Image (cartoon, helix red, strand yellow):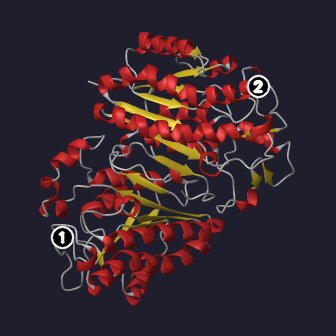
Amino acid sequence: MAAMKRVAIVTGAAKPDSIGFAVARGLMEEGCEVVVADLYTEGFAAFSGLCVRTNVSDPASVEAMVAHAMKKHGRIDILVNCVGGSWGITEQDLRAAPRATFLGLENCGDSDWRTILGANLDSAFYCCRAVAPHLKAQGGAIVNIASVAARKGIPPGAIGSSGPYAVAKAGIMALTRQLALELGPFGVRVNCVAPGVIASGRFLKVSAMVESGKGPEGPLANIPLGRVGTVGETAALIVALCTDDAAYMTGVTIDENGASYAA
Amino acid sequence: MPLKGLRGKRALVTGAASGIGRSVCERLRREGVEVVATDIHQSGGLVVADLSDADEVEKLAAEAGTPDFLVKVAGGPVAPSRGNTLPPLPGKSRLLEDVSDRDWAAVLAANLTSAFLVCREFAPRMKARKSGRIVNFASIAARRGSDRVGVHYAAAKGGILGLTKTLALELGPFGITVNAIAPGFIKTPRIAEAGWGDAGQAFIDALPLRRAGEPRDIAGVVAMLCSDAGAYVSGATTDVNGGWYFGP
């Protein structure tokens, strides 16, 4: 008899040029049933499986999405929290050009702070909390996405980016460690990938706004590997962390940044 | 997305006679990688070499050619010699004042000098090809310190991290990634023989994943780092320890 098909939830997977999209595709290749949770509903047509309009900053929306996934599939084995973004991450921003500013300490309003922490950190907490009882039922894996920004900060002035993003992503690393302790005894592994500059659709749009050869976070020539990362490479790493290849890893952040910051 | 980018590639695996190294060879071969295996310990099909000796490393290079993946597992808490290739593991940690000059030099040579010599020999060949993956072996001892072996081992493995980060900067422009794996408690046959596993049941029960690691757990991460999943990972140390220690 064939093994039960594993079920994965990937948040932020609907935009076709995103890391989340490539993760969803990769998990399908691994044989998973993939549930896509996103606000970018026009991307849902690319998926044959369950897609749920979800605002991951809203716990009620997350609970409803997870209930929907359970109703359809009866189990959840994997959660990948891909939703995030550094500045300009409201629902309207999904369809707009990146904001041509840097958001730092003195120009960050209360609501900006809440929005950025909400989308990047609260979202992962809500999703982990909602799926934990289901993952614990048979074991599984969570992968969170942090950023090299959590290691080295965002250079002030970086267009389309923000300081609170670095703070939120550092929180993701701590959340990863904490949940590794809490969920490990139930066979649930929790790991994190901290990408550097990755050529997602969003990155390409920001790049078009700055002088050539200069990434949003400084000269690309400063990356020892001599290039930005690809969405496919990052997704392959995230997917590998969901598999038995990473069976003895938990609480770990893998820095994936072309040697631009060795933690 | 089963691991991609492995089939048809060539790997050199050091410390391949037993334990983690052997498991790495098996795993890479299963992925379609052509593996040259080496160890100081004689075992079927292996190239025997003492990697703390630059002349032997040079001879090894003549046999191994230019690998796509250089996986350097060789090393450990005690230093082998040509006369005693599989010395028993120490029963308990050695205090600072009990680490002899000889122990210090031998463990540094087996773990750190060997890694340096192998990189110095093979990196120029990889540079010429503008590609390659180097996977070094550190240890949890380099992350949290060692209370099972001693300062000599922790210092040697800490040196591996400096080597890894520096080579990531230096070789990056040539398309070569350089990473380290820091295993935690991995139950290899030698470690089981030394009785480490029996003494530590309470310790294992306190690990978040509630088990000791197996050599295949490390082999999986090696495969990951050599595959497309590791293409943009460089200068990184991957902790594989069941949640014992989370790194920085």
Q: Closer to the camera, B230 or B196?
A: B196
Q: In the picture provided, is A179 more to the left or to the right than B197?
A: right
Residue B85 percent coordinates (x, y): 21, 78
Q: Secondary structure at mark 1?
A: loop
B154 to A133, vertically: above or below: below
Residue A3 visible in image: no
> Crowding near pointer 1: few (<14 within 10 Å), some, many (20+)?
some
Q: Which residue occupies 57% across, 21% down?
A: A37
Residue B62 percent coordinates (x, y): 43, 83
Residue A82 picture quarter: top right
A178 to A12, vertically: above or below: below
Q: Which residue occupies 32% across, 50% down?
A: B217
Residue B23 visible in image: yes
A124 to A240, vertically: above or below: above
Disc 2 is attached to a residue of which chain?
A
Which disc, if any, is residue B90?
1
Q: Which residue occupies 35% across, 63% down?
A: B145
Residue B135 picture quarter: bottom left
Q: Secondary structure at mark 2?
A: helix
Tell how many labels: 2
Q: Mark 1 or mark 2, which is nearer to you? A: 1
Q: Amino acid at mark 1?
A: Pro
Residue at which label 2 appears: A93
Q: In the picture provided, is B6 more to the left or to the right than A117?
A: left
Q: Closer to the camera, B67 or B117?
A: B117
